[in-house]
Amino acid sequence: MVDMFSENPNMPEAMKKIDEYSQTLYEKMESELEKLKHDEKAYDELAGTEYDSILKKYKHFKLQLNNKMLVLNEIS
């Protein structure tokens, strides 16, 4: 690895930029994971409520609609 650095003096700077970029991506992913965990907890708290019932019906009707749209697209 030392030979790589001596061949190209810009290599340490490139490695530093790659490290900074990967750290930025990691922090974004960590933040998104925390948000998803929060959203999941909020959704779990709605289980068994009227909202949960409406959401289940909506998902069921949406699935039926998507299936019918697929069939219509196939025959047209």
Image (spheres, rainbow, N blue to C red):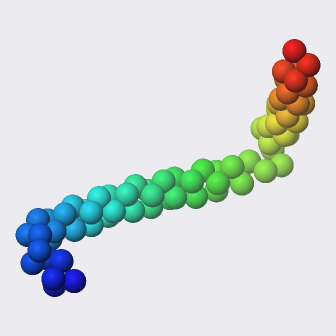
Residue drawn at (9%, 78%) of the image: 6
Taking depth in this image into account, of 30 and 68 the one nearest to the observer is 68
Q: Position of residue 71 (x, y in %)?
A: 91, 25
Residue drawn at (83%, 49%) of the image: 48
Decide if residue 29 is on the left or right side of residue 4: right
Where 1 falls versus 42 (above or below)? below
Quarter of the figure with residue 14: bottom left
Q: Position of residue 26 (x, y in %)?
A: 39, 62
Q: Position of residue 25 (x, y in %)?
A: 37, 57
Taking depth in this image into account, of 50 and 68 the one nearest to the observer is 68
- Residue 68 visible in the picture: no
Quarter of the figure with residue 29: bottom left
Residue drawn at (27%, 67%) of the image: 19
Where 41 falls versus 63 (above or below)? below
Residue drawn at (85%, 27%) of the image: 70
Q: Position of residue 67 (x, y in %)?
A: 88, 30
- Residue 60 visible in the picture: yes
Q: Residue furthest bottom?
A: 2
Quarter of the figure with residue 5: bottom left
